[in-house]
Amino acid sequence: MSKRLYTLYIGIALLCVAFIPASAVEIEMPEIEKTSLDNGLDVYVIEQHETPVVTMKLVIPGGSIYENDETAGLANLMSGLLRKGTTSRTANEISEEIDFVGGRLGASADKDAFYVSSTVLSKHLEIAFDLMSDISINPVFDDEEVERLRNQIVGAIEQSKNDPTTIRDQQFAHYLYGDHPYGLPFIGNSETMLMLTSDDIKEYYHKYFIPNDGFLLVVGDVEPKDIFNKAKEYFGKWKAGTPVTVDLPSMPAINGYEIYLIDKPDATQSYISIGHRGIDRFNPDAFSLRVMNYILGGGGFASRLTKEVRGEGGLTYGIGSSFDYNRYPGAFKVTTFTKNESTAEAIDLIFAELEKIRDSRITEEELDNTQSFYTGYIPLQFETPANIANYIETILLYELGEDYYNRYLQGIESTTREDVQEVAQNYIDPDNMLIVVVGKREDVEPQLQKYGDVTVIDMIEL
């Protein structure tokens, strides 16, 4: 098959990056060579000969985006079973083979994709190809293994029902996304887990886990021609499928304050999540939003929320804000916890900071510190095969373009104080917010009523 040579540019002397002016920082990447197999699987190779290590990642777009109320948790269950036996190996044999060479082999899923990955010494490359292709192409989804993993997941679900952080996050997603698959619990729920069968898993696997939707990325001490030959040998027999399109419902609009209190009678602290619809990964303002959010609540101890709510207010040990960067629009949210009696005080301080970053410009020092963080941090991530694979995987999965990380840095560097205020005004709406709190109703509900009507949910109903 024909192959394209993708060339991205790498910054010289990464160790000296901290001493280079921000405007001069440029990420360089090694050459990426590509071919495509007859079944549609794209294969990308990056040579890194500094250490005798290879990282391989098979990525299939999809993940939990294909789930609904009746199949919640299926992507997680299916991907977890890939390592649990094939037509030629048992789960124990798979583990013994990868452990014998000191390598790693894993399979997982998230909202936007399925993943199979392996890291081995380059001399064990053949074993990695053999095992990765086997669990990807020949899983059996044995009834006994299905039952075992399903019981483990159900146990984890039941245990999480006492974890206020998990409850808060799941309920916030539920009310924010409505019928959209992003609102489903990724791990599933006890009801769906107990209903899913081996046949359901097999049908899901054959429908969505197909080579012509995905790619294989290999980074490390390898030669591209050798990788292309091995990819054809091990993955070429994988039969192509029919790509599936998904018609997704819109996220519900939030009008005013929508307030939900999950009553946990034994709680001494309230766990708070405040937010609304955010952006998708492709939003042209994403870089300026990263700057804004770092200053607001994404920058740890350097952020305003940490300084005001944790530092000055002394109300919490942890607080942060974030935007989701997925294929479809995600959430903007602020999360924290505080004593039951200081719930409203913490929420008031959060709203004050949201208003402040909209109403006035950030300082030059805040902007300089944020830009210095990103222009120093990002280039240094391209040092090991595993890190390079993770970053390139993002480019390929979301089709961001080979110059993405240079555009990322340029976007950060070119962001102005005016830009930060503008995106804060455009993407943060303090007047229309979802507020989800897990706490003791007796202590918390009277405080929340100052913001509007409160919907109280008993923990038993979850």
Image (cartoon, grey):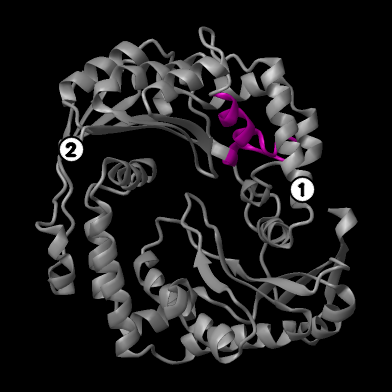
User: Mark 2: which amino acid?
Assistant: Gln
Mark 2 vs 1: CB contact within 8 A: no
Residue 300 is covered by the magenta coloring: no
Q: Residue furthest left?
A: 12
* Spatial CA span between label 2 and label 1: 43 Å
Q: Nearer the viewer, residue 127 or 308?
A: 127
Q: Which residue is mark 1?
A: 159
| 29 left or right of 448 in image | left
Q: Residues within 10 Å of mark 1 (few under 14, many from 20)?
A: few
Q: Position of residue 461 (x, y in %)?
A: 88, 54
User: In x, y percent, where is residue 374?
Assistant: 30, 68
Indicate whether residue 76 is drawn in magenta: yes
Disc 1 is placed on an element classified as helix
- For the residue pair 361 and 81, the one nearer the viewer reads as 81
Q: Is residue 90 visible?
A: yes
The picture places residue 59, in percent across and down from the top left corner, at: 41, 33
Percent x, y for residue 331?
57, 62
- Quadrant into which the N terminus falls: top left
Which of the 4 quarters of the picture holds residue 431?
A: bottom right
Q: Residue under label 2, please give it.
A: 48
* 300 over 46 or under it: above or below: below
Identity of the amino acid at label 1?
Gln
At 45% from the left edge and 15% from the top edge, which residue is drawn?
134
Other-residue count near label 2 (Cα within 10 Å), few / some / many at <14 / 14–19 / ≥20: many
Q: Look at the image and tell me whether residue 241 can be seen.
A: no
Residue 392 falls in image quadrant: top left
Out of 369 and 314, give the one closest to the viewer: 314
Question: Where residue 230 is drawn, which disc sits there?
Answer: none
Specify start and end residues of the magenta stretch as a single range. Answer: 64-82
Task: Classify residue 335 by image quadrant.
Answer: bottom right
